[in-house]
Amino acid sequence: MTENPADRGAPSGERATRPDLAAMMVPLGRALMAAEQPALDAHGLTMWGYSVLLHLDETPIRTQAALAEAIRADKTRIIAVLDDLETRELIRRQPDPGDRRVRLLSLTPEGRRVRDATQAAIQENEERLLARLPAADRTAFLRALRTLSAMPELRPPRKRP
């Protein structure tokens, strides 16, 4: 019989328990999103709009569909978000000279300013939360989150045409 890692360290015959990851992460994620909302509101952003601004600076995006996939958004729902950000001159959508059917997405200087100000406000609040952890736990927590969030198997499978 294979040993269950959750049972390590439990007295013989007893099962060690811990909450499931989602049971721990979902309430934390909801609380963090609620804590971010005042910063988003102050800058006139939705969570999806903020996600777009963060991702456009991180990686050059060639298509709206690629952006939607990268931020795990439905490509049909992201259009209204992009329309709003473009109207506010936070992003630019330009035809690709090599394929005019494709829209190249880029962040404007104003988009970068709004993104940076929003991120600074959000991370200031996060720092207050993280300060409750001992330094070693904080470092390990952030490292584990980065590692887990970067795992390709956590991304939804690509749909095939």
Image (cartoon, rainbow, N blue to C red):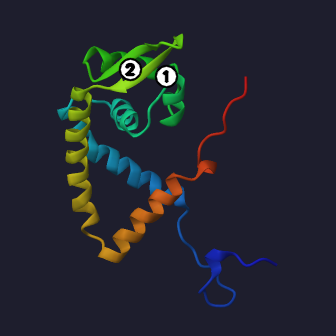
SS at circle 1: helix
- Eyeballing the image, is 155 above or below 133? above
Q: Position of residue 132 (x, y in %)?
A: 26, 69
The numbered mark at residue 150 is none
Left or right of residue 18, residue 140 in this image: left
Which residue extends farthest top? 100
Q: Position of residue 113 (x, y in %)?
A: 20, 34
Task: Name the residue rendered at 59%, 87% in the picture.
Answer: 9
Task: Name the residue rendered at 44%, 18% in the picture.
Answer: 79
Residue bearing the label numbered 2: 82
The amino acid sitting under disc 2 is Leu
In this view, the residue in front, 97 or 22, is 97
Can see residue 44?
Answer: no
Question: Alpha carbon of mark 1 to alpha carbon of mark 2: how far?
Answer: 9 Å
Could you say which quadrant of the image residue 137 lies in?
bottom left
The amino acid sitting under disc 1 is Gln
